[in-house]
Amino acid sequence: MGYQSKERKSLKSGSRTGERRMLWILWVVLGVLIISVVAFFVWRSQNQHAFILEQGQKDLLVLIREDAQSDYQVKYEGTEPVDLKSLHVMLAGQILHVDVKQVMLVFGDQEIVLEPNGSMPAGTNFNLKPGDIFNVRVIFLGQSLGGNYLYGFRIVYDTGGNEQTYELVMNFDYSVVVR
C-alpha cells in the first residue's frame, strides 16, 4: 500500500509540472506576439509619411559665379493627406562651394517659390495626397572651385494639427561641382 500512494503522488506532481510548463510556454508565446504587434505599429508610424526621391540630376556642374538649375522629383508615400510647410536643401561638405539661390516647388500647374529660409510664402497652401509627385527645382550659385553633395531635403509637413519633420537623405549620390 505504501508503494501505491507514492506512485499516485508522483503522477499528480508530474501532471502539475506539465501544466506549469504549458502555462509558461503560453505566456512566452503571448509575450512574443504582443512585442511583435507593438514593433509593427512603431515601425509603421515611423514610416507612415515617407517621401522618396523618384529622380534627379546626379552630377550637376555649376560654373563659378554662375547659376545652375536642377530638378528633383519627389513622391509622397504617406497614408493620409498632408500640408507641406517648408523644405530645406541640405548640402554636405566642410566648405560650401555653392549657395542655394532659390528653391521652387512645382506641382501640376502650380509653382511656388519658397522663402529664403525654406518656408512656404504666407497664405500659400501646398496640399499632398498619397502618391502625389512634385518637383523641387533648386537654383545653385557657384561660389568657389570645388564640390559639395546634395545631402537631401528636410521636409516639414502638417498632418492636421501635428507638425512633423522628415529628412529625405540621398546618401552622397548627388554631387554639385563648381568649375
Image: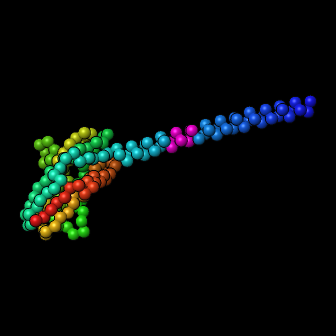
**Do we see residue 95 in this rendering?**
yes
Give 34 or 155, whichever is nearer the viewer.
34
Q: In which quarter of the image is the C terminus?
A: bottom left
| Applied colour scheme | rainbow
Majority SS type along the magenta span: helix
Give the percent coordinates (x, y) of residue 32: 53, 41
Q: Position of residue 13 (x, y in %)?
A: 77, 36
Q: In which quarter of the image is residue 62?
A: bottom left
Residue 22: percent from the left, percent from the top? 65, 35
Q: In this view, does 20 lie to the left or right of 51?
A: right
Left or right of 69, for residue 126: right
Quadrant in which residue 43 is drawn: top left
Looking at the image, residue 44 lies above or below residue 151: above
- Kindly identify the residue that appears in the image at 21 percent across and 60 percent down: 149
Location of residue 121 with respect to 45 vertically, above or below: below
Highlighted range, magenta: 29-35
Q: Is residue 174 magenta?
A: no
Position of residue 131 measured from the top left corner of the image (x, y, whole percent): 25, 39
**Residue for point 30% across, 52% down:** 166
